[in-house]
Amino acid sequence: MSENVWFNPLRLGRHCVMPKRILLLTFFYPPDLSAGSFRARALVETLREHAGGAVQIDVLTTQPNRYHEHASETLVFESGDGVRVRRIHLPAHRSGFRDQGLAFVTFAYQAMRHASDERYDLVVATSSRLMTAVLGAWIAYRQSARLYLDIRDIFVENLGELFSAPVSKILMMGFGALERWVVRRADKVNLVTAGFLGYFQPKYPERSFSQYPNGVDDDFVDFTLRRYRKNAAERPLQILYAGNVGDGQGLHRIIPELARSLGGEVHFRVVGGGSRLQMLREAITSGGLGNVELVEPVARGELLGLYQQADVLFLHLNDFQAFRRVLPSKVFEYAATGKPIWAGAAGYAAEFINSEIANAAVFVPCDSLGATEALRRLKLEQTSRPEFVARYARSRIMRAMAADVLQLVGAN
């Protein structure tokens, strides 16, 4: 559809009420592969379903770039059914802090340029590393628009883990000031997990925060269970990890040791990419570990097939203090498959998995001995979890979140 073709209220008659204009800012959007991408699309679809012609939505995002190995160009502009999506081209970059900073500056500059051509009633920013929230706050401020923030990570606290002093202190002071500005500027703030409340509530006691989590995507709500462990005695236990391979996951600190100690009893398949993939690859090569397979990121349909083949799903968070507050989005789709879950986690994630998910074994992050003991506790069988899937179905969560967003423009 042509870029200039857009909903024209004049066609409906002179008594037509102008639809509310909503801008959604997200660094990732389908066909990019990430939890933030799928969440953003689900929110857009639900907003349109909930409000119909009462809203027009513009999405400013990037060309697929979540994984360097899976990056591919797609349509720069799409328009239809009251939604326009513009994807901004970024310079080639990897997962390093500097590269990501340069990529974001490109996105922010282009996003501000395109947004300045329009007038919005509401800006919605979904942000994992704070700066998309800052960008949303700036655009909303310039346009006197209302602001809804969807916070998916605690960026400032993470800086203390990623950098040593005095660099970490300087960065935390600077980004901390930005965080205070955006949180206080926002009309509503959603936290993607209740674990974040322990950080945000003491810092902003005057604010109330909603908690709409990632939830179980429709693809996993309909996940079909297959017969478990065919020819189990003839092959190693198939262990699958699917997701990012970065500092936050710390796979390079746990998988090589587990592969070495468990030997032929297991076969690890790691599907994904990230800043620590090369370090993991080097550890596998130097250790001569033939029971670890590295697979590049795959599309959702292919990933479902890999889940079907697995005997156990593996999850791991690095032993950073800041990660005691997070809840990986992967937890929801893992649980929906009915597969046993082997998880290295602490803090809120450990509490959530232990209390909410049957047939899941949790161990202290980076503790290979504890991990082996946890593996022995798992029942190697399918575990139907219908109550969990119903409670955390993304469609249900997004309906509530969309209603919360639309309250800001009176379109609900």
Image (cartoon, rainbow, N blue to C red):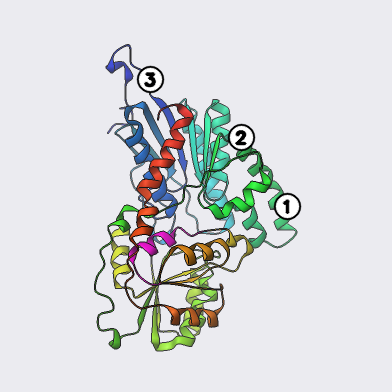
Looking at the image, tell me whether mark 2 or mark 3 is earlier in sequence order.
Answer: 3
| Rendered position, 44 above or below 313 | above
Looking at the image, tell me whether mark 1 or mark 3 is earlier in sequence order.
Answer: 3
Instruction: Look at mark 1 in the image and give the residue it sits on.
Output: 170
| Rendered position, 139 above or below 375 | above
Residue 199 appears anywhere in the view: yes
What span is colored magenta in the figure?
A: 327-341
Residue 331 belongs to magenta span: yes
| Rendered position, 307 above or below 175 | below
Mark whose residue sits in front, 2 or 1: 2
Mark whose residue sits in front, 1 or 3: 3
Instruction: Look at mark 2 in the image and give the residue it sits on.
Output: 185
Q: Is residue 256 left or right of residue 291?
A: right
Give the Cα separation between the discs numbered 1 and 3: 46 Å
Give the Cα separation between the discs numbered 2 and 1: 23 Å
SS at badge 3: loop
Residue in the image at 52% along x and 43% along y: 210
Quarter of the image that includes the C terminus: top left
